[in-house]
């Protein structure tokens, strides 16, 4: 098995099927943005904008599916490499530690992304998302985290033209800093639920290799998660 045929392409295959084609311990950094069932259902407020309506129509991942992704990500990550896991405030409060059972991943930090723009909400209005930083054992900061100017509250607005590309687009500035900090030139960065492929765009500029697909879930994935 070799990663070479998968590198630097805009793939459109099941994210789990993609992960199963990747070599063990070959990935230097992974970003994962699950399509959370509970949050997408909560987005149907009745007065949401086009972006929120778009998010609500995305294929929603069950908890079992998310766990299947995380187990595969754990397998393909190098030792002491990081998984950048996007979570919402509901999972932040309820906890996601059970997702890490049977893996060597451990929570080591958290970044709050301040979008600089007020969103929807039943009570308070949402202005932030959360990036949970997980590291594969053995845990260590030295030589695995090179930049020391990344704030744990990171303010970055998404340009309007990028918002039109995908309803779940993420900040390129923050992603670029994390790629610089946690990988080296020539390393492979993974995004199995790539959406607008913003991580790929960052990798091109930073001279990293990329593997990812924008089709996170389809019938193949559903079969894989029920085995």
Image (spheres, helix red, strand yellow):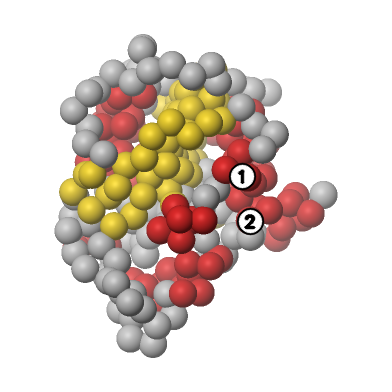
Identify the residue at horizontal 61%, vertical 44% (top origin): 99
| Residue 48: quadrant of the picture | bottom left
Identify the residue at horizontal 32%, vertical 51% (top origin): 170
Q: Nearer the viewer, residue 116 or 169?
A: 116
Q: Secondary structure at mark 1?
A: helix
Image location of residue 55, percent across then percent down: 43, 69
Image location of residue 196, percent across then percent down: 38, 53
Q: In the rendered image, which residue does mark 1 sit on?
A: 99
Among all residues in the image, which is located at the extreme top? 143
- Vertical comparison of 190 with 171: above or below: above
Q: Is residue 4 visible?
A: no
In the picture, the disc for residue 70 is none
* Distance in Å between CA atoms under marks 1 and 2: 8 Å
How packed mark 1 is, by other alpha carbons closer than 10 Å (few <14, some 14-19, many 20 or more), is some
- Vertical comparison of 20 with 139: above or below: below
Image location of residue 224, percent across then percent down: 75, 50
| Residue 166: quadrant of the picture | bottom left
Q: Is residue 210 left or right of residue 66?
A: left
- Vertical comparison of 198 with 137: above or below: below
Q: Is residue 126 visible?
A: yes
Q: In the rendered image, which residue does mark 2 sit on?
A: 63
């Amino acid at each position: 098995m070799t990663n070479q045929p998968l590198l630097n392409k805009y793939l459109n295959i099941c994210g789990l099927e993609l992960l199963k084609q990747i070599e063990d311990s070959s990935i230097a950094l992974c970003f994962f943005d699950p399509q959370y069932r509970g949050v997408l259902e909560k987005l149907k407020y009745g007065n949401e904008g086009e972006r929120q309506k778009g998010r609500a129509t995305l294929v929603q991942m069950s908890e079992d599916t998310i766990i299947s992704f995380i187990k595969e990500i754990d397998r393909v990550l190098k030792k002491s490499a990081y998984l950048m896991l996007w979570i919402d405030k509901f999972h932040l409060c309820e906890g996601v530690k059970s997702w890490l059972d049977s893996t060597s991943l451990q929570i080591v930090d958290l970044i709050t992304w301040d979008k600089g723009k007020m969103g929807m909400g039943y009570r308070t209005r949402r202005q932030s998302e959360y990036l949970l930083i997980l590291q594969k054992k053995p845990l260590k900061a030295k030589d695995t985290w090179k930049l020391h100017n990344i704030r744990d509250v990171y303010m970055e607005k998404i340009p309007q033209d990028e918002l039109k590309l995908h309803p779940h687009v993420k900040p390129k500035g923050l992603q670029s800093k994390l790629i610089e900090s946690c990988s080296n030139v020539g390393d492979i960065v993974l995004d199995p639920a790539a959406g607008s492929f913003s991580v790929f765009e960052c990798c091109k500029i930073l001279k990293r290799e990329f593997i990812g697909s924008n089709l996170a879930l389809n019938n193949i994935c559903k079969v894989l998660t029920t085995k």
